[in-house]
Amino acid sequence: MLDICAENDVIFLKWMFLHIKWGLDIVERVWISWNGSGYRGTGLDTVERLTFFTNEMFFFNPCPALYAVIYSLHTMNGGIQNMNKDSRNEGLWVKIARNRNYMKCPELGLVMLKSDQQKALPQPPLCKEARGVITEISANFNGVITQGLYTELLDKRRSERVFNKEKGLSQNQLAFLLWSTQGVSEIRGANYATLRPVPSGGARHPFETYFAARNIEGLEQGVYHYLPLEHIGEKKVAIEYIGEIPDHDKRITEMLSGQKWASSAPVVVFLSCVAYRAEWRYSASAHRVALIDLGHVGQNLMLSACAMGLGSCCIAAYDQKLCDKTLNLDGYEEYTVYACAVGEAIK
């Protein structure tokens, strides 16, 4: 019995010393990172370097609380050290430091090693499949473009918030808006990537395009979904009807956080993000890349509207839950990320 107790004591002592060793190792790594040596060659800043080895070591140490404390203290001191000497954004320093750090480029070599693509997990679909009846809409782009010179187009593009409520869009105009932002011209590899009018990190194109039709030639009011894979390499457009929008103007105003002016536009385009489409390749860094890609889509949309003599205004303020509900999105795997009202502007 004494032998068993003694053996258990030895096991406990070994376990305790092992944890002390782990703890000292963490402190040593924090000190190395804090002083800017050791991990500097990775290209990560201090917080990012600490985040990396904290995440890595978490799986080898059954005491993650220690990491959380050290990381939190380090972030508090390192992330806001340049902001706590004045009154700018007082009380929000920690959040701002975190968000600024999020905008920076991580060491992609480390990110890619952890991605599901590198783990050879199945690739998600390139686009969502149709769930309803597919409708083909007219797509004669030559008849809708009114602005020929690119320099004039750039001069004229402005955010417009006053629309002619009585003037609708033709199907050709709608088709050009959809195709010029998310149309698929080619599929590369074994269904690996799509080539589109807009760039996207790793050719992931994690967005889906929906639109709320208020006054579109030949279409009833409601929510529609663009289906770019129905016409690969063709300047043709297919859509599917998702559902009605009860009390259209009131609902659009509510969806866009009280911005009533947008409800007078004949169409409001909504972009959603199917997050895993980008996460599969870029892991936890996918969301930063997706936000960059979102800007490309928005600019194409606005320039295309301007090329047809239409006004537009991109919108980043919206009711997340109401938009997701109206577009029939689950809010987790797919969720609303952008909106843009398009129509004939009243100067």
Image (tube, rainbow, N blue to C red):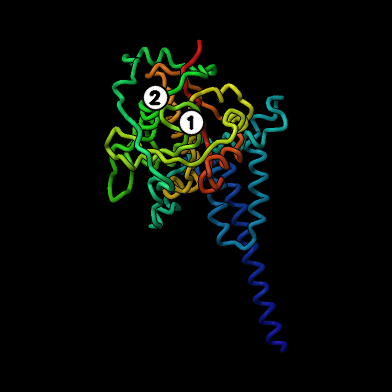
Residue 157 in the image: x percent, y percent? 44, 16
Is residue 317 among what the camera can see? no
Mark 1 and mark 2: Cα distance apart in space: 11 Å
The residue that label 1 is drawn on is: 213
Residue 340: mark in rendering: none
> Secondary structure under badge 2?
loop
Q: Residue at x 43, y 32 (%)?
A: 219
Residue type for callout 2: Ser
> How many neighbours does mark 2 have within 10 angstroms: few (below 14), some (14-19), or many (20 or more)?
some
Q: Is residue 6 above or below residue 250?
A: below
Q: Quadrant of residue 174?
A: top left
The residue that label 2 is drawn on is: 170
> How many neighbours does mark 1 have within 10 angstroms: few (below 14), some (14-19), or many (20 or more)?
many
The number of numbered badges drawn on the structure is 2
Residue 292 in the image: x percent, y percent? 46, 33
The one of 228 and 171 positioned closer to us in this rendering? 171
Residue 266 in the image: x percent, y percent? 49, 25
